Amino acid sequence: MLSRRVKLRFSEVLGFGAVALVYTLLWTVGAKAQEIQASAGVVCDTQEQMEKFIAYAADDPRSALERVNKDAANPQACGHVTAAFVRGAEVATARIKHRGFTIHQITIVAVSTDAGWRRLGQPLAQFAAFPTNELSA
């Protein structure tokens, strides 16, 4: 599924176009008024891949994506993306050293490319990790 993803820069600044896109998407979501978020980060095809990414990142963050993709026998199982998405329910929790994360299924509705934001023809279900406020000793 990730073959539709585009490699993106994390330093990209969300400008007026992104704000306009988010407002447009809010109108198209309907009566449920689901919150569209825009963020850059790592997403994976499955919950298990995201859990592995977090575990590998604790040891070696630079090679974590490569290791998960190798394990999955899919060079695009996990990747970096800047996207507009709806966050779904929490499906798991994870920890890197003293930092907690919640793993959620997300539905990506648009991605940022070098040419600007592009709305996906079909929303794409993925898994993403979000830091919690929890810190432990």
Image (cartoon, rainbow, N blue to C red):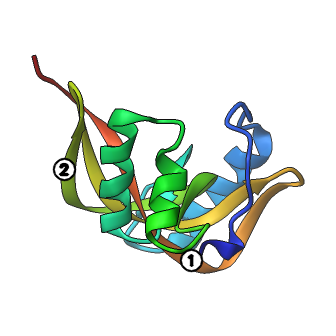
Residue 63 x %, y %: 52, 43
Residue 113 x %, y %: 80, 54
| Outermost residue toward the left in this view | 137
Please tell me the numbered disc located at residue 123: 1
Q: Is residue 117 above or below residue 109?
A: above
Task: Compare marks 1 and 2 and give the one earlier in the sequence.
Answer: 2
Q: Quadrant of residue 89?
A: bottom left
Q: Amino acid at mark 1?
A: Pro
The reply, left or right, for residue 45 in relation to residue 109 is: left
Q: Quadrant of the C terminus?
A: top left
Residue 74 x %, y %: 56, 73
Q: Is residue 113 above or below residue 64?
A: below
The reply, left or right, for residue 128 in relation to residue 100 is: right
Q: Quadrant of residue 9?
A: top right
Foreground residue among 98 and 70: 70
Q: Amino acid at mark 2?
A: Thr
Residue at 89% across / 54% down in the picture? 115
The residue pinned by badge 2 equals: 93
Foreground residue among 109 and 114: 114
Residue 37 in view here:
no
Residue 103 x %, y %: 29, 54
Residue at 46% across / 72% down in the picture? 72
Mark 2 secondary-structure assignment: strand
